[in-house]
Image: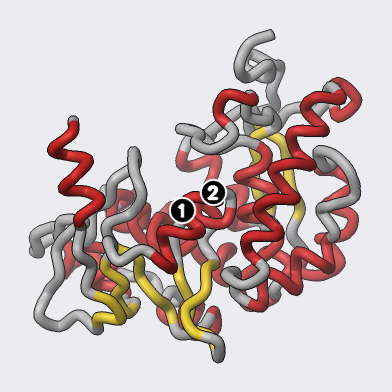
Amino acid sequence: MTRNRYAGAPRNADFTIDQRWDSYTPDEHDRWNRLYARSADMLQSRACPEFLTALATLDLSQGGIPDMAELSTRLEPLTGWRVVPVTDLVPDDIFFDHLANRRFPAGAFIRPEAEMDYLSEPDIFHDIFGHVPLLADPIYADFMQAYGRGGARALARGQLPNLARLYWYTVEFGLVRSAEGLRLFGAGIMSSVAESRFALDAPDPHRIGFDLERVMRTDYIIDDFQQTYFVIDSFADLLAACSGDFGDLYDRLARMPDVQPHETLPGDFLFTRGTLAHFRDRAAAG
């Protein structure tokens, strides 16, 4: 069996496929259960309250890989979102159209045993465990739809890299303030036990207060933990910051230099100035 057995599967015009839920093997269901158990346990003291509430509401621990159609029947009455299966990453315009219409495209394959701890591309565990629970939160659900609607504008202006940075530093790797301190909400962190520890506990990364312009200027790395994590105050504040058309912001960004992932700027609100030791050690070893 290939690593992603859905590769090459017949797909619709919107890149969705038949999940073929009955085709998952007992080993694959067991792999989901083990991934779920260790991540859910780790996140009890680390994830934001909205994620934990939504995780309990959707009950993704029912035993094995979720059937996306069945999951959608529980999610849609809450916020109008559905989960649709795809083979892997879809083209940008298709992705934005799905989000704008409250459909979340989730990869249907599950990572192999050898890649339990690190995966270079999103699988069904990353997409459903990491992303879908917060789609049951009404405010976050509205933010995700607003992001999707903004995608076409970014494409038309040639400024998709700026918008992609917003997604990366919030939806994938965002932190949020809570009464108990900083908490996780980004799916890339949620679906990684190692990064769940690193993002909150390690002295290495910077943790910087969210500023929309700053985030959309900041490049990122894809092959290691993040050198900088941005911290939002609340999902309501995130939605408010991202509800405009970004026209004036895009004009400014086009005239401004990018910020490197390890940099801090004079105007940054620093929760933590990182040592960056992990990244220097990795560079020296490589």
**Which residue was labeled with disc 2?**
192
**Which residue was labeled with disc 1?**
195
- Residue 61 location (% of width, % of height): 84, 52
Which residue is nearer to you in this view: 143 or 168?
Answer: 168
Residue density around tag 2, few if under 14, some if 14–19, many if 20 or more, within 10 Å: many
What kind of residue is marked 1? Glu
Q: Is residue 223 left or right of residue 242?
A: left
Which residue is nearer to you in this view: 74 or 42?
Answer: 42
Secondary structure beneath dot 2 equals loop
Q: Residue drawn at (79%, 42%), measured in percent from left and top?
A: 33
Q: Quadrant of residue 79?
A: bottom right
- Residue 101 location (% of width, % of height): 66, 56
In the depicted structure, whether residue 134 falls above or below residue 244:
above
Contact flag, marks 1 and 2 (Cβ < 8 Å): yes
What kind of residue is marked 2? Ser
| View extreme (top): residue | 1
Which residue is nearer to you in this view: 268 or 14?
Answer: 268
Q: Is residue 7 left or right of residue 234?
A: right
Q: CA distance from mark 1 to mark 2?
A: 5 Å
User: Which quadrant, please, contains the C terminus?
Assistant: top left
In the depicted structure, whether residue 118 falls above or below residue 103:
above
Asked if one can make out residue 278 in the rendered structure from this viewpoint, the answer is yes
